[in-house]
Amino acid sequence: MEWMVWTTPTTVFFAVIAAMLAGMTAWEVISPTVERKGFLPISTTRGDRLFIGLLSAAYIHLVVVGFTPLSIWLALGASVLWLLVLMRWG
Amino acid sequence: MNKVYNNRAWWLILPMLLLVAFSAVIPLMTVVNYSVQDVFDANTRFFTGTEWFKEMLNDPALQAAVLRQFAFSLTVLAIEVPLGIGIALIMPKKGWQASAVLILVTMPLLIPWNVVGSIWQIFTRGDIGLMGWSLRELGYGYNITASPVDAWATIILMDVWHWTPLIALLCFSGLRSIPDAYYQAARIDRASKWAVFRYIQLPKLTNVLVIGVLLRFMHSFMIYAEPFVLTGGGPGSSTTFLSQSLTTMAIGQQDLGPSAAFSLIYFLIILLVTWVFYTAIMNMQKDDNNQEA
């Protein structure tokens, strides 16, 4: 694995993604998702909302890193908050 | 009635998943790792954090390339999709003509990208190329190495020539799968040709068009060999699209960190656009079904 030039932050990043996928799978087995409509213009399942949340989190990070002097931790905080809101009411 | 859910068929995609993990997921993870470091060799590397992303997002040349890329992709989609549907509608449906036309239409799809570039490069030359020479004889000072407008028009023409057949073929197969009963019903109702197209053919084409639009968008968004051979990205940088910027950076200058960061941004753009396309079209369909029901 040496050629993959791992760093601590990227390891943590992928570990969290993997944990999320595993968690979602377990959650789905315990109580299957029901498609519903929240504040998003389309009806979504749990997995759809996670995907939308992660994709928008990537863009939040890019905007914060690229075009503002703000810290990346702020972007992370905002993304987590947004993801939770999305999962609950999206 | 009790419905039994059995999702065991999902195990069948396991081999595919392993293959994709090997060919796509692990390399992509490596790209992510490279994007936060300055790597010289296996032992000499420095953590740079978000430095490369900041640099790439604020690079005026890359910003211009992104806009250029969107302009190109949307233009070819706007031309190829209606044109492809049109061609599919007038293609003969049976007999030897059907096979003959099918083969003729498919021909451009069989030509490799860089050969297409070479063909057009010769085709557009002012001294020996048929199109270049003809246009000059007609009094238009056509020159793709000097005029950005000529270069753009030629690249779009080339892409339309190369890829409209794909849309046409997909639509042709979509049209063939519509049962005759629909047309008979339309005839009884004395539906106009337009009504038949709007309410029978187009809705039945949605599925193939989704695939067509997605494929064409991704293809055109990653276009590399054709403009590279035809114009080399010029004149100036007027036809330098994203892949070419990326290749110059990664292969030409060996700037692996910045190119990794740039690849990820590129990937995120494609992911967002394809997801929006897909969701929008799938929802349109869902609404249609609800209305029918």
Image (cartoon, coloured by chain):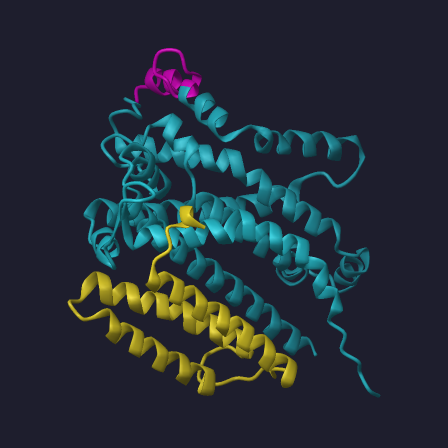
Residue A67 percent coordinates (x, y): 19, 63
* Residue B128 magenta: yes
- B213 relative to B52 in the view: left or right: right
User: Could you say which chain is coloured yellow in the image?
Assistant: A
Q: Residue at x 46, y 82 (%)?
A: A87
Quadrant holding the N terminus of chain B: bottom right
Please indicate, yes or no, whether residue B83 appears anywhere in the rendered image.
yes
Residues in magenta? Answer: B122-140
User: Could you say which chain is coloured cyan in the image?
Assistant: B
- B196 relative to B180 in the view: left or right: left
Residue B144 percent coordinates (x, y): 31, 26
Residue B234 percent coordinates (x, y): 28, 31
Q: Residue at x 61, y 80 (%)?
A: A28
Question: Toward which corner of the image does residue B105 lie, by quadrant?
Answer: top right
Q: Residue pushed farthest top? A: B128
B168 up-or-down from A41: above or below: above
Question: Toward which corner of the image does residue B150 lie, by quadrant?
Answer: top left
Residue B50 percent coordinates (x, y): 25, 59
In this view, the residue in front, B261 or A82, is: B261
Q: Residue at x 57, y 44 (%)?
A: B84
Please indicate, yes or no, whether residue B266 appears anywhere in the rendered image.
no
Q: Residue pushed farthest right? A: B1
